[in-house]
Image (cartoon, helix red, strand yellow):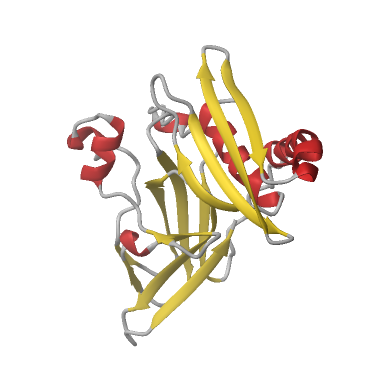
């Protein structure tokens, strides 16, 4: 398991155990990745810390908790079970609809190796987006309007190419050659796809909107992960 996969699985495991994510940090040279969370039980605040260490053999995960005797007694086994369940969950990607307008948003759980860049330790989450317009109408869209939402409701916009270049230590021209989703006009019976890049974190849904060129009405989409 890569560091990115481990950090994503740790985030999901913490949420599955009923904790609210309070912080995330990607792994960096010499420093482990980190996810923190907390929950309140019987007026006591229980805090969880998960660290992901990158090694030449993959990722090592260490978790600890503070705040209650029951948590200490059952935590390691509960966390291991939740982590394994999240790590093994690979829901099939649904097919895009053949009628109407449909949007697929797929967070990349395998570090985006098909993009030719290893995003481990960069704090970047590649997200694949596919938009199909199986109608007779044309739509306008902006890629920056695709917003990811965290469990606490915080909404996050994608990096610009300049911000992405700084994160992955590449010239802006090189990031411009990535298969990024570009905004524009979506013609009838047209499908477009590409990647957007976000700060690494635990996201639960995405929101996107397109504008009908003829009526100037906006059509919104919520996509659950």
136 or 148: nearer the viewer: 148
Q: Residue at x 44, y 43 (%)?
A: 200
Relative horizontal placement of residue 28, taking residue 165 as reference (left or right): right
115 or 205: nearer the viewer: 205
Residue 136 shows up from this direction: no
Residue 64 shows up from this direction: yes
Q: How many marks?
A: 0
Relative horizontal placement of residue 121, taking residue 173 as reference (left or right): right
Q: Residue at x 75, y 38 (%)?
A: 72
x and y percentages locating residue 209 in the rendered image? 41, 71
x and y percentages locating residue 150 in the rendered image? 51, 58
Where on the picture, by quarter, is residue 170? Answer: top left
Q: State whether residue 184 is above or below residue 164.
A: below
81 or 18: nearer the viewer: 18
19 or 13: nearer the viewer: 19
Q: State whether residue 33 is above or below residue 100.
A: above
Q: State whether residue 1 is above or below residue 68.
A: above
Position of the N terminus, as image quadrant, is: top right
Where on the picture, by quarter, is residue 147? Answer: bottom left
Relative horizontal placement of residue 101, taking residue 180 as reference (left or right): right
x and y percentages locating residue 19 in the rendered image? 64, 52
Q: Residue furthest top?
A: 56
Q: Residue at x 44, y 78 (%)?
A: 219
Q: State whether residue 216 is above or below residue 179.
A: below
Position of the C terminus, as image quadrant, is: bottom right
Q: Residue at x 57, y 40 (%)?
A: 8
């Amino acid at each position: 398991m890569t560091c990115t996969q481990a950090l994503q699985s740790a985030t999901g495991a913490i949420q599955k155990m009923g904790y609210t994510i309070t912080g995330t940090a990607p792994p960096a040279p010499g420093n482990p990745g980190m996810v923190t969370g907390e929950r309140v039980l019987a007026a006591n605040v229980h805090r969880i810390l998960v660290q992901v260490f990158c090694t030449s053999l993959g990722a090592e995960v260490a978790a600890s908790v503070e705040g209650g005797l029951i948590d200490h007694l059952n935590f390691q086994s509960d966390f291991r079970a939740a982590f394994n369940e999240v790590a093994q969950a690979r829901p099939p990607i649904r097919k895009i609809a053949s009628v109407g307008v449909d949007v697929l948003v797929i967070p990349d759980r395998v570090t985006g190796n098909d993009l030719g860049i290893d995003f481990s330790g960069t704090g970047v989450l590649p997200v694949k987006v596919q938009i199909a317009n199986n109608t007779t109408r044309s739509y306008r869209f902006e890629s920056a309007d695709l917003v990811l939402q965290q469990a606490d409701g915080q909404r996050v916009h994608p990096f610009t190419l300049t911000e992405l270049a700084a994160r992955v230590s590449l010239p802006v021209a090189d990031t411009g050659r990535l298969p990024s989703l570009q905004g524009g006009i979506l013609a009838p019976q047209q499908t477009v796809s590409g990647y957007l890049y976000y700060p690494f974190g635990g996201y639960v849904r995405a929101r996107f909107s397109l504008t009908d060129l003829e009526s100037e009405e906006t059509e919104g989409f919520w996509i659950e992960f």
